[in-house]
Image (cartoon, rainbow, N blue to C red):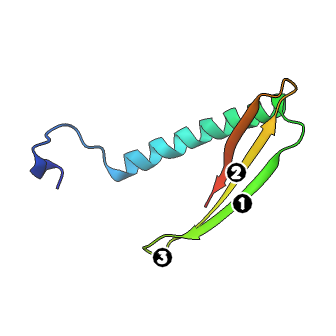
Amino acid sequence: MIRSTGYHGFIPKADAIAKRIKDRLEVTQKDLITLLDSTYVIVALSLDGWTSQNDISIFVVNGTWLNSNFKVYRACFDFC
């Protein structure tokens, strides 16, 4: 379908894209753990859940916290 639009560049396979996303997720999770270790005292959690139009259930856990200088941090802790 993409080629029918006239695009002739490299299109990675789905497995390659999935691997890149998983690798990036691991790095991002390690970075978040490091940030939390160095900045938080208390984390406020917010939960959200919904079902998409194509009947996929989604649940999200978000966190918000302050460091000692009152800088606000926000992160998605889980998305399933």
Residue position for label 1: 47
Residue at figure coordinates x 90%, y 37% from the top left: 41
Between disc 1 and disc 3, the foreground one is 1
Residue 57 rendering spot, x and y as whole percentages: 56, 71
Residue 36 rendering spot, x and y as whole percentages: 79, 35
Residue 72 rendering spot, x and y as whole percentages: 75, 33
Residue located farthest toward the top when viewing the structure as drawn: 69
| Quadrant in which residue 78 is drawn | bottom right
- Report crowding for label 1: few under 14, some 14 to 19, many 20 or more residues within 10 A (C-alpha): few
Residue at figure coordinates x 62%, y 37% from the top left: 28
Gap in angstroms between the C-alphas marked 2 and 1: 6 Å
The amino acid beneath tag 1 is Leu
Query: Is residue 23 shown left or right of residue 39?
Result: left
- The N terminus sits in image quarter: bottom left
Residue at figure coordinates x 57%, y 43% from the top left: 25
| Quadrant in which residue 43 is drawn | top right
Question: In what element is the residue under mark 1?
Answer: strand
Query: Is residue 50 shown left or right of residue 53?
Result: right
Residue position for label 3: 55
